[in-house]
Structures are given as C-alpha cells and as structure tokens.
Image (tube, coloured by chain):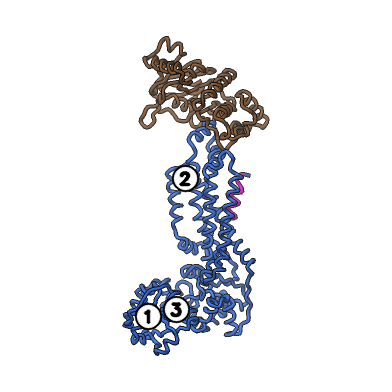
Chain colours: A brown, B blue
Amino acid sequence: MFTLSQVSKHYQDKAALAGVDLSIAPGRTTVLIGPSGCGKSTLLRLLIGLGEPDSGQLDFDGQPLRASTLPAQRLRMGYVIQQGGLFPHLKAGENVVLMARHLGWSDQRIQERLDLLARLTHFPADGLERYPNELSGGQNQRVALMRALMLDPEVLLLDEPLGALDPMIRFELQEDLKEVFQALGKTVVLVTHDLAEATFFGHSIVLMRAGRILQIGTLEEMVAAPAEPFVEQFIRAQRSHLLNGGGV
Amino acid sequence: MRRWPLGVLVLIVFGLMLGGCARSEDEVVIGSKKFTESVILGEMLTALAQTTGRPVLHRASLGGTRILFNALQAGEIDAYVEYTGTLSHEIMARETAVSPAELRAWLADRGIALVGSLGFQNNYALGMPEAEASDLAIHTLSDLKAHPELRFRFGSEFMERSDGWPGLRERYGLPQQDVRGVEHELAYRALGAGEADVTELYTTDAEIAYYGLRTLDDDLGYFPRYDAVLLLRADLGQRAPSVRAALERSLGLIDVGEMVALNAAVKIEGEGEAQAARDFLRVKLGLASEVSSDGLLARLARHSLEHLMLVGVSLTAAICVAVPLGVLAAYRRRLGQVVLSTVGILQTIPALALLVFMIPLFGIGAGPALVALFLYSLLPIVRNTHAGITGIPVALRESAQALGLPAAARLRRIELPLALPMILAGIKTAAVINVGAATLGALVGAGGYGQPILTGIRLDNTALILEGAIPSALFALVTQWLFERAERAVVPRGIRGRSG
C-alpha cells in the first residue's frame, strides 16, 4: 500500500529520517515502534502528506503524494492523533460527519454510516450531541476513530492513539480497536512506544532508532534473532518494565 | 446566499458615505466654529440667507479654523465669519501683519471673496474694572505706566507668548511687578472680587459686560487686528446673487458693544444662539423670523439616529474589510507584518488631524467622520482576527488538512469558527471605542451625541453636556451587552469562554 525507498527528512539540520526503506502491506496492521525521537511519528506524518521527504521516494498505492493529488489521496486514508485532534467548536457527531457533509453525502447515507460506526466503536448515541470538552479522553478517541473511518478509507494511520489515556480505559480501547481492525481488514499503520501494545496489534513490527529502521518482523523473530544489540536491549528494557508492573 | 450580503453591505456603506457629503444644488450652507460668537454669527447669516426663500443649512460648531477654511475652499460651505488676524497667522501662516489688499488677493486666488467687515474687532486687549479705571483716569495702555502698583493677572498662554505679555511690557515700558499667570476664568473672578486690577481679554468677551470692565485702548497699536469679516465662495454671486446680497446686509451691522451683549445673552443669560441672533436682526433690520427648535426628546432621537448611523455604518464597513485583512495577515506572515503595522499607524493619527485630512476628500458632515471611524475600527478587528487564526493549535490545523478538506473549506468550517470568539472580542472593542470616538464627529458636522457635548462645553452648560454624555455612555453599555448576547448565541458551547 505504501512503498518507501531511501526516504530522508530533516528538521532544522537534524535528521528525523535517514534513508528509510519500507513496504507496508495492504490489509495488515503494521506497528512503528522505537524510543522517543526515533522518527516513527515523522514517518507516519509523511504517509498522510503532512510534510514531504527531503529525498527518496514515497508512493501510496503506486502514486507519489503530490500537492495536486493530495486532497483526493487523503480521502482514502484516516488519521488519528494522540489527543484526538477533534474540533472543539463542533459536536462529536459533527466532527465525525464533517468531511462527508463537505463531499455532499445525503443525510440518509451519513446517518446510516454514523450509526454503524457508533456500534462498531461502542460509542453511546447520546454522546454524539456533546462537544469534545464534554466527553472523556477515551470517548474523544472513539470519536476520532469514527471520524477517521467515516469515508471508509483503505488506510488507517494512528499516532499513539492511546498514549494519553489512563490504563483501564486504555485496556478497554485496545480491545475495541483490535476488534475494529479485524472486522474491517484495513491497512493499519500504528505508532506506539509500547512493545506490549505493538505485539498486541501488530502483524508486523517495525523497530526504529535515530531515523533508521533496525528490524522488521514479529516479536518472536526479534527475540530469536535480533538484528542489532539495540534490538535486544530495547526488548529487554520493555519486558522488565512490564514485569516490574509499571503499567502498560 | 453566503456571498451576496457582503457585497450589498459594502455598496450600502459607500452609498451612505457618498450620501453624507452630497448636497442639493439649491441649498446654501453657512458654517461656524465651535465657539459662541461664531455660532451666533452663523445663525445671523443663516437668518439673512433665509430671507431669500432658499433652503439654508447651518453647519454649526465645526471643529476649528482649518476645518472651516478647507470646507469653504472645497465648496462644502458657502459662507462663514472669520477674523483677519486668524487668516494671516493661521491660514496664511505669516509672522507679520498682512495688508488688507494682500489678504483679499490671496483669498481670491483660492476662490474666496472677503466681502468686508461686520463692524467689530475681536482683539486681545487689557481690561480693568470700570470704577477703578475711572478713579485712576486710565483709558489707554500707556496710562498704565503711571500706576506700577497695579496687580496684573493673565492667562498662562498670554503670559508666555512672545506676542503676549513679554512683548507688551517691552512696547509700552510697563513697570508693574505683581504679574502672575492664572486660569483665565479665575482672573475674571479675581477682578470681580477686587483681588486683581488688570487682565487680558478678547474685546467681545461676554465677561466684559458681566464684570463691568473697561477695555483699555491699545494706543500704540501693539495687538494685531482681528476684524470680523464675511468670507464667501467667490462663485456665490453668480450662483445665488440674492443670497450674496442678503448676506452683505451683515456688513457693518454689529459694533463691539453689540457683540459683547450678544455673547453675554448666550453665555451668561443662557439664551439660545439662534434666538439671540434673530432678536438682534429684528431690532436692527426689522427682520421677523421664527427659531425652529426641537424639544429634548426630538433632539435625543435625532442625535441617537445620527450616532447609530455613524457607528453602524463605519463598524460594518470595518468588519467587511478587517476580517479578510486579518485572515490575509495570518496566512502571509510578511504581508501580515505590513498590514498590522499599517493599521497600527492609522490608530496613532490624532482624530482631529484625520478629520481635517478627510474634508477635501469627503466634505463636511457624516463622510469624513465615517471614514475616520472606519479607519480607527480596523486595528482591533484585524489584530484579533490575526491572533485568533494564528492561535489555533497545530494539531487542529493538521487534523483539518489530514481529513482532506481543501484550504477554503478549512478556513470556513474550521479556522474562522475557532477564531470566532477572538474576532467577536475584537469587534466588540472596536464598537465600544467607536461609540466614544463618534462624538468627535460633531467637529465636522456629522451630528450625533457629540453635538450637545460640544455645545455644552462651549457654553459651560452641564445639562447640555450630559444630554450627550449620558446617552453616549448608555449606548456603549448597550453595545457591549448586545455583543455579549451575540457571542453567547453564535459561539458554540464547546469553545465558549476560551478567549473571553
């Protein structure tokens, strides 16, 4: 679905991505993981066109992302960020249907889609009439997910969607998210810094450090054959963290 | 549906602005400055012009010499009474005296006819209580030399101006030592209470009659002459010969004692200027005419309507221009700096100067006031629109992009609504400032609450000042209240109170 070859990106002379090669398979969940500043969020932002590679080639379904084609290409992607990015002046429901309205969908089509998504994400119907600041953090993320899914995109891009939630809500939403991914069979790219979460969601885990991809595979593969000492280190650190009961 | 109201509003605004400075061909317009004597003389010219049966408008109490003169030159008014000293010093900006012939020629070059003197001068002079002056046998300034013990009290400006006391003392060789600068009004009172002997005055001051003062003769001709002269548009003779002839009846009509009495009737006895002027014409020329005057409620209604028009039109125009400018400034950072500094500089131009600049372009009346108020309203709205849009969190901006909304839709559906509380706050600020600033419109004949305020200040009449000040304050409060209501109505609950 996405093909990156030798993609680099700099922010103020600092390399955020340094020659990344990656192919993201359709219909599967790919998780980008790594320590802070490893370039995983930058990579995700390039996928939705919030920034262009300084060098290298990035194709979406065989086509590069260009300013002229970007609006149409974005309609095929859904994007969720950490704090939801919901528009505070619009009610939850209005946030969800904003783009569909702009595209001129009929009321009936919008309503049907909205009902379906609310069921899918276990979002209470009366919550749609509330403003984001009247909803909990978890509910905000459910609304953000509905908004991303409204146009039934082929791709879902999530940037630490659960990062700002407290553990109980996070656990519940993790389950629901996985259910949604499985039910819809979409291409999902998810960024997290949490290995347990990555393992929980990912068909394939992309471990990054300092703007480079260190290893791609499942957790088992990484444990069995770490590509670099850092891979082993990263896994060990996260596991001991888990064993010490330090939250997910 | 979304687009046409803006275009229509702009058209209405410009229509009203043009309407504010257009006038019918037939109408004769008399002007006067914002001091009592000038208004009385303006009323007198008005009454004389009305004898021809033509419609006559008196633009009373305009802001000052510059405004009147520019208006006459631009043909916004047809006639007013000016003083020769003012013409040579302020308009021609000459240091030394100008001969009458030179003055006439200079004015003629500018399409203005100096027709002649009304019969009195309004000069600087020194005065002292009549009884004391006659005891000491003082008639002229030279006579003062023999009385070094006299106590002189002068207004502070007269004390310091080189053509005031310092020059006067030198010219006449005056020996007095007890000379102090005080508030001019207090100098009169001190004379009345016997605590001072001599003060400076204008030869037509109402106080001369009230305090029983003798005006001392300037026997060495030290003070410049301020002959009251009738100025007309040179073309008035062809356009309306009967009006010119009627106005010329004022020549030589009023001597200095009569002018003092007229000023006293208005300033001290509280008679209306129009009444005083017409009473005088009845006695001197046998002219019978009625003063049309409104009751308090009618005046209030008229001033309110004028004020509402000034504020409403200028604010609407400012919103139509300032919001797009603010958006532009937010999108183009370089251009934005230019826009923000330009509207900032506009704000620093003093109101009176701005009004004077506007007269050649927009005439007398609502035109220049509307333009000035429009310009003053820009800054708060532009700045708040700019701040409202640039203050939107990056995450929200990017979320709108990531959804695939095109730029125009992002602006309309996301950015403007999010900036709305800030924009409304800017408009509210502009509106409240505007209500206050609109009172200055009276300086250029735009009417509104400023008119009773100016007249009240001129006549030292508190009731009149309040007649303008109270409604103006209420107007500002109501405006503020309405905007707060509007804010509650149009700003969604989700972002209310975030930038309050």
The residues bearing labels 1 and 2 have C-alpha atoms spaced at a distance of 64 Å
Expressed as whole percent of the image width and height from the top left, the position of residue B234 reads: 51, 74
Question: At 63% across and 34% down in the image, what residue appears?
Answer: A129
Q: Is residue B32 left or right of residue B181?
A: right
Q: Of marks 1 and 2, which one's residue comes earlier in the chain?
A: 1
According to the picture, the residue beneath numbered tag 1 turns out to be B151
Q: In the drawing, what numbered circle is on residue B119?
A: none
Residue B232 seen in render: no
According to the picture, the residue beneath numbered tag 2 turns out to be B329
Stretch in magenta: B2-13
The chain carrying label 3 is: B
Expressed as whole percent of the image width and height from the top left, the position of residue B440 reads: 51, 63
According to the picture, the residue beneath numbered tag 3 turns out to be B202
Q: Of marks 3 and 1, which one's residue comes earlier in the chain?
A: 1
Query: Label 3: how many residues lie within 10 Å, few (<14), some (14-19) or many (20+)?
Result: some
- Quarter of the image for residue B420 reads top right
Question: At 54% across and 26% down in the image, what residue appears?
Answer: A77
Above or below, comparing residue B30 to residue B213 in the picture: above
Main SS, magenta residues: helix
